[in-house]
């Protein structure tokens, strides 16, 4: 099975603030990979480095076998990214935001977007300023999924979602993965990784501490973070 993500000895320093140190991991095609750790562990920094939003100090990143630096534009065309913060223009309607995200890619995603909105029970007629955190998260999910990318990258996607919508969200991931996609799920919720992911990695203080199958027991997990605020 080919590797969709290959990170080799990646380091990013923020001076006195915590970054990431010597991170190496691989994610195979068709995997649902759980990237777990508390806030500030380095998960988002790793993801933003993968997407080319940050300039790293050392190490290499390949996605789809291509350099994340030299072939970034081609790579991003096949990625669906959902950041941890769901920020949109407050005056826009949900339908306008979703269409804008598709238009930027030059793709008609209307049929897929309508399907996802129906599954997630998202009212597309409301303005962004009228939405709760959970519904803003739903908008982010639609924008990340509607073009059916080869790789999904979700950063804390389920915060604010009620349990039923969380279940439907993971059912969507399963559907796309069965059709050949790959998913990297960054979260601080251990139960999500154990329930839905096939492989996982634990981050602590900017370092990759454990690569394993997802069934990480609570005692092992808490042992890595006994001095952290979970």
Image (tube, rainbow, N blue to C red):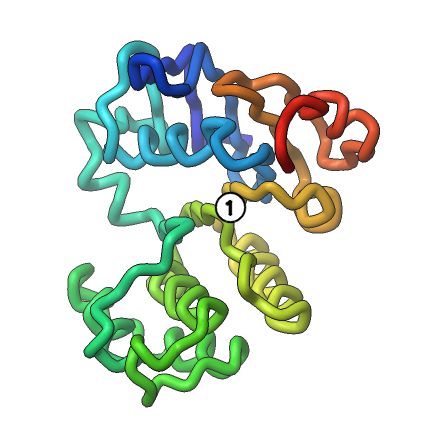
55 on left or right of 14: left
Quadrant of the image containing the N terminus: top right
Give the structural element (helix, strand or loop) at label 1: strand
Quadrant of the image containing the C terminus: top right
Above-or-below relation of 111 to 147: below
Foreground residue among 68 and 160: 160
Foreground residue among 154 and 175: 154
Estimate the x, y position of residue 70 in percent, counting from the top left: 17, 26
Q: Measuring 44% from the left and 12% from the top, which residue is drawn there?
A: 21
Estimate the x, y position of residue 24 in percent, counting from the top left: 48, 16
Q: Measuring 22% from the left and 23% from the top, which residue is drawn there?
A: 55
Quarter of the figure with residue 124: bottom left
Q: Measuring 48% from the left and 50% from the top, which residue is drawn there?
A: 181
Estimate the x, y position of residue 189 in percent, counting from the top left: 65, 45
Foreground residue among 77 and 99: 99
Within 10 Å of disc 1 (Cα), the crowding (few <14, some 14-19, many 20+) is many
Q: How many marks can you see?
A: 1
Provide the residue designation for mark 1.
183
Above-or-below relation of 4 to 185: above
Q: Is residue 64 visible to us here?
A: no
Quarter of the figure with residue 112: bottom left
Q: Is residue 38 visible to us here?
A: yes
Above-or-below relation of 145 to 33: below
104 on left or right of 41: left
Estimate the x, y position of residue 102 in percent, counting from the top left: 24, 67
Q: Measuring 57% from the left and 66% from the top, which residue is drawn there?
A: 161
146 on left or right of 56: right
């Amino acid at each position: 099975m080919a590797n969709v993500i290959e990170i080799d000895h990646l380091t990013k320093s923020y001076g006195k603030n915590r970054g990431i140190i010597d991170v190496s991991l691989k994610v195979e095609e068709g995997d649902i990979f759980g990237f777990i750790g508390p806030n500030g562990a380095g998960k988002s920094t790793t993801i933003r480095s993968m997407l080319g939003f940050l300039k790293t100090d050392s190490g290499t990143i390949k996605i789809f076998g291509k350099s994340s630096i030299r072939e970034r534009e081609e790579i991003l065309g096949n990625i669906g990214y959902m950041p941890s913060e769901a920020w949109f223009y407050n005056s826009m309607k949900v339908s306008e935001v979703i269409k804008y995200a598709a238009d930027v890619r030059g793709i008609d995603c209307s049929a897929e977007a309508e399907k996802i909105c129906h599954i997630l029970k998202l009212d597309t007629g409301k303005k962004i300023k009228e939405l709760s955190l959970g519904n803003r998260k739903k908008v982010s999910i639609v924008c990340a999924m509607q073009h059916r990318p080869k790789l999904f990258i979700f950063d804390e996607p389920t915060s604010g979602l009620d349990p039923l919508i969380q279940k439907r969200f993971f059912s969507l991931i399963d559907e796309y993965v069965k059709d050949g996609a790959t998913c990297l799920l960054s979260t601080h919720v251990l139960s999500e990784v154990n329930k839905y992911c096939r492989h996982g990695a634990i981050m602590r203080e900017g370092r990759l501490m454990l690569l394993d199958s997802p069934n990480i027991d609570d005692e092992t997990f808490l042992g890595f973070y006994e001095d952290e605020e979970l």
